Image (cartoon, rainbow, N blue to C red):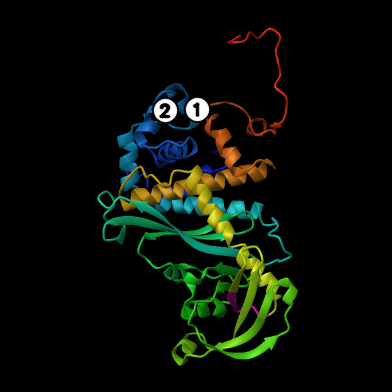
Amino acid sequence: MDTIHPEQFRRCVQRYRGDYKVKTFSCWDQFLCMAFGQLTFRESLRDVEVCLRSRQDQLYHLGIGSLVSHSTIADANQSRDWRIYADLAQILISRARSLYRDEPIGMELQETVYALDSTTIDLCLNLFPWAHFRRTKAAVKLHTLLDLRGSIPTFISISEGKQADVRVLDELLPEPGAFYVMDRGYVDFRRLYALAVACAFFVTRSKRGIQFNRVKSRPVDYLAGVRYDQLVRLKNPETRGHYPEQLRRIRYFDQETGRDLVFLTNNLLLPATVIAFLYKCRWQVELFFKWIKQNLRIKHFYGTSDNAVKTQVWISICVYVLVAILRKELQSERSLSEIIQILSVNVFEKVPLQQLLAEVSLDSEITHFPKQLMLWE
């Protein structure tokens, strides 16, 4: 937790008056309790309370200056603005991106590459009536923009389950020169043109039924899997009004899956094989969703209100980014999953992190102590 600068956290709290008229259980206490629940895989606030109260003598050294109660944490999650922790996450994300800016992505490309996608988290309609999804079901969507250098989430939006994925493009602030890799669910030519006008590049799959006028065909490397590389314009007058400029359409045969994929992009310079590889990198955002669902508590929420859900999600993102920062600063070869598993069983241990994460060979032989007796003969 020393990675979080106290003054930066205080500014986030003051911005939304998080500690206004709070006497005993501060936003920092709330954050530590919720982060403890994430790191140790607690299933409920009652579990958090029981575990922390069992180590009451060490809570002060941990940074928790108040008596821990599940009702107090629940009230804080209900009433304190979730944007406190969203702003804190952005500070940590900025630091993590600076650490991972030189991470390779599998090709010589200087520009930033983002993968955009969403994942749906199913909820109980009786407990979460505000999270509209289907007539008998509730859900929330996690829309995530992932920086592929280090798999750091740079933008997250939480919406009702029924919201269309493409609408999240209206919330993005395009970065000039960056690549945005998306699935075909984000094909909306008015929104894609907004990316192009902002001097950003996009790579996406083409939908069926879209009609084009071919302007030019380029030479292709058939052995590399490229079937055609064309400059096209939209044929429908209404759609062309949304995107009046030329597009590039690439058909690529993926030998691993045996499928023909058709890509659309506004980048006219990169080789077609690089465009195909960029789209393949989009899979990293799927791996990110799988990781946080397996290693953090975002499938089971501690509260049922909109504010409580967003608070828990943003604190879980803070924990993810903190682990990523820790891994880079200590130059550890361990995966993020291994680090969080090690931390989960050593939360109260006063051990230097460098020593805690020291590499131990899994293939090393078991040391036999001659004075150690066997439990069973």
Residue 180 magenta: no
Residue 179, percent across and down?
61, 69
Quadrant in which residue 147 is drawn: bottom right
Q: Quadrant of the C terminus?
A: top right
Q: Using the rendered image of the protein, determine whether residue 27 is visible from the camera's viewpoint.
A: yes
User: Of the residues under marks 1 and 2, which one precedes in the sequence?
Assistant: 2
Q: Is residue 247 above or below residue 358?
A: below
Q: Residues within 10 Å of mark 1 (few under 14, many from 20)?
A: few
Q: Is residue 150 above or below residue 246?
A: above
Q: Give the residue at x 54% y 68%.
A: 182
Q: Give whichever of 7, 213 is nearer the camera.
A: 213
| Marks 1/2: CA–CA distance | 15 Å
Labelled pair 1, 2 in contact (Cβ < 8 Å): no
Tell me which amino acid carries mark 2: Cys
Residue 318, percent across and down?
50, 47
Residue 114, percent across and down?
58, 64
Asked whether, in this view, residue 151 is left or right of residue 106, the answer is left
Asked whether, in this view, residue 136 is left or right of residue 331, the answer is left
Q: Residues within 10 Å of mark 2 (few under 14, many from 20)?
A: some
* SS at mark 2 in the image: helix
* SS at mark 1 in the image: helix
Tell me which amino acid carries mark 1: His
Quadrant in which residue 266 is drawn: bottom right
Residues in magenta?
262-268
- Of the residues tagged 1 and 2, which is closer to the observer? 2
Number of residue marks? 2
Residue 319, percent across and down?
51, 44
Asked whether, in this view, residue 201 is left or right of residue 141, the answer is right
Q: Which residue in the structure is indicated by mark 2?
A: 51
Q: Which residue in the structure is indicated by mark 1?
A: 61
Q: Give the residue at x 61% y 46%.
A: 325
